Amino acid sequence: MSMRVTDSYLSSLLVGDLNRSLSSLLQSQRTAGSMRRVNSYADDPRSVSKIQRYNQLISMNEQYRNNVSRSRVMADTTDTALQTIMEVLGDVRVIALRESSALATGQTMGTATVEVDNEVNRLLDVLNSSVEGSYIFGGMETSQPPFVRSNGTVIYQGDGRVMMSRTGPNSLVPVNIPGNTFLGTQSSVLGGRQDLSPIIKGTTNLDDLDLGGGWEPGAISLSDGLGNIWEIDLSSALTVDDVLNTINTATGGAVTASLTADGTGFEFIGTGPLAVTDMGDTNTATSLGINVTSDGGILTGRDIRAQALSTTLLADIDSMAGKLPLGSMQVDYQGSSYTVDLSTATTLGDIETLFEAAVPGIELQIGDSTLQVVGGTPDVFKISNADGTNTASLLGIEGSGTPVRLFGMLDDLKSALDMGDKDGVRSILSELESLQNLVSRQLILNGGRQNDLDWADEVLLERDERLRNNLSLEYDADAAQVAADLSRAQMSYQASLTVTSQMFQYNLIQFLR
């Protein structure tokens, strides 16, 4: 039984096959042109949702990296600002040390007041630093300068909130330091006003002189009014007696070197004028405080006493001469009163131990030349004399302890300079040291944040690479596979065209049949 296949049916079969071959070729060409395996939802419905999710995660990761980048700029700017604040405090310390010394005069104090004003202006510039128009020390109030002058003082108009930067799905990093951190610490501090540096003795080690700054070994030149010039090598000296003996031996008694009556430095007696200078590139005379020229026969060096230590004997402190043993003082703190009996103390270390044993929550610290009392909270405390020995006054710690203040400290320094109050200038040193410690802690804190941001950026970079690799597996086409598929599609389409053209090659004879 024969079956007749109509031309219409045959034509539909050939055209359908031709269209399928053409569609396959177009799909392969589109994949080759985009190198994307999925170009529409119909290509792979299952992969589309994964691709959308990966794109979303990559976009979020890029936002986290942008947050890290902006936060790092703020952290770097903060680091630079804190370094500058440390420089300013160092300059202020130099001013305070200079103007509390015996060489300070009313004229130098007047000049120092101007210097302190300039340092205040530097601090204002630094603390009003901004990044992209946002003030970094204003807390969350970033649109206006946090520190402004008002009625002769500096006020803070920011807040105490810390800005947090999201550096990952579950991670937040603080990026700023509120400016009120510098207005008051979490501790109350009372800086001592009494110079407790021990007098210099013959046995004093030269490395301990000048508040622990030491000396520079080398040679000095000593001359007198008779034309004598002695070049004296002191490089092998270890103690004060070594210096005195070497100089007196070199001059043969023409010039006598000794310690001043108050034990603060060196003194030379001879036929004036007397002059001591450094030799070569060394600063030996300067470090010993004797780089001086006198008009008469007595040359007195500057104060180079050693720093106060826990081992310093109270009997070696000039201000306590004839006032030992010590008595008692009273400390009022957090609603309680404590009596501190120091009658058994013979060293500064004894005072420290007895004080801390009697008053819980408050530390007594020994500075370069003064005592400092530090409370464990910002609560104000008060120290007063408890008997007729005036022990608190003798130690220079009578008064009230308050939180450490930046601009308040500078205002107090200016006031002391204006009044010519050397003790007041010296009392600033303790609070100044506390401020330097505060800024140092902020530098360490900010450095830790910088490290955290660097680590977060590395983690986000690795995460971005993983996400893009996973997206590529779902989204991108394999180049070798695309080339093979395209070649097969072209061959299939060409074969379809050939078959179709051959099937439709009718002539008159074939039609008549």
Image (spheres, helix red, strand yellow):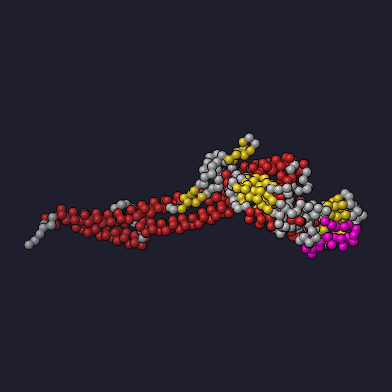
- The question of residue 254 being in magenta is answered with yes
Say whether residue 299 is left or right of residue 452.
right
Say whether residue 432 is left or right of residue 69.
right
Q: Residue furthest bottom?
A: 236
| Residue in the picture at 8% in, 61% down | 2
Above or below, 2 relative to 178? below
Of the 4 image quadrants, the one containing the N terminus is bottom left
| Any part of residue 484 in sight | yes
**Location of residue 346 by image quarter:** bottom right
| Any part of residue 87 in sight | no
**Location of residue 155 by image quarter:** top right
Q: Which residues are magenta?
A: 236-259
Of the 4 image quadrants, the one containing the C terminus is bottom left
In front: 414, or 226? 414
Q: Residue furthest top?
A: 151
Say whether residue 307 is left or right of residue 160.
right
- The question of residue 314 being in magenta is answered with no
Where is residue 36? Give x, y as percent: 36, 55
| Residue in the picture at 58% in, 46% down | 181
Count of numbered labels shown in the rendering: 0
**Location of residue 232 by image quarter:** bottom right
Say whether residue 90 is left or right of residue 471.
right
| Residue in the picture at 46% in, 53% down | 171
| Residue in the picture at 43% in, 53% down | 169
Where is residue 311? Give x, y as percent: 71, 59
In front: 233, or 486? 233
Q: Residue furthest right?
A: 226
In front: 395, or 115? 395
Where is residue 451? Give x, y as percent: 53, 56
Where is residue 57? Give x, y as percent: 40, 53
Q: Residue furthest front?
A: 387
